[in-house]
Image (spheres, grey):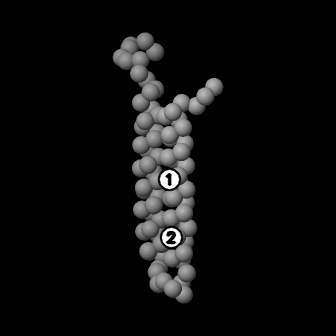
Amino acid sequence: MEESTKRQRFTKVATNRVQKIIDYLGLLQNCSNRNNYEYDEEDVNHMFDEIGKALKDAKAVYTNELNKSVGKGGFSFNK
């Protein structure tokens, strides 16, 4: 069975965007060199708390979209 156009578009776009995020995390890792940068534990925790929140929010959007298709049967007293 051939993949749908929407599926093909998703895999192409999502693959590129995920790779960009991974690449940028690598760039962020470069900032860990204490010979070139000064930071403390609070800075590190703040950065990764914000990254964690952004990841959680992004995942929630996907989860909400997936859940939209569940329960489309409408109201019923029958269980």
* Helix, strand or loop at mark 2: helix
Q: Residue, x 46% and y 39% (percent of image)?
A: 63
Q: Is residue 72 above or below residue 12?
A: above
| Earlier residue among tags 1 and 2 | 1
The residue identified by callout 2 is 28
Q: Are there few (<14), some (14-19), or many (20+) residues within 10 Å of tag 1?
A: few
Q: Secondary structure at mark 1?
A: helix
Q: Which mark is residue 43?
A: none
**Do residues under tags 1 and 2 come within 8 Å of each other at their CB atoms?**
no
Residue at image position (49%, 34%) is 6
Disc 1 marks which residue?
17
Query: Nearer the viewer's eye, disc 1 or disc 2?
Result: 1
Cα separation, mark 1 vs mark 2, equals 16 Å
Q: Amino acid at mark 1?
A: Arg
Taking the image as shown, residue 43 lies to the left or right of residue 1, namely left
Relative to 18, residue 9 above or below: above
**Front-lying residue, 41 or 57:** 57
Q: Quadrant of residue 19?
A: bottom right
- Residue reaching furthest to the left: 75
For the residue pair 67 and 42, the one nearer the viewer reads as 67
Amino acid marked by disc 2: Leu
Residue 76 picture location, percent across and down: 38, 14
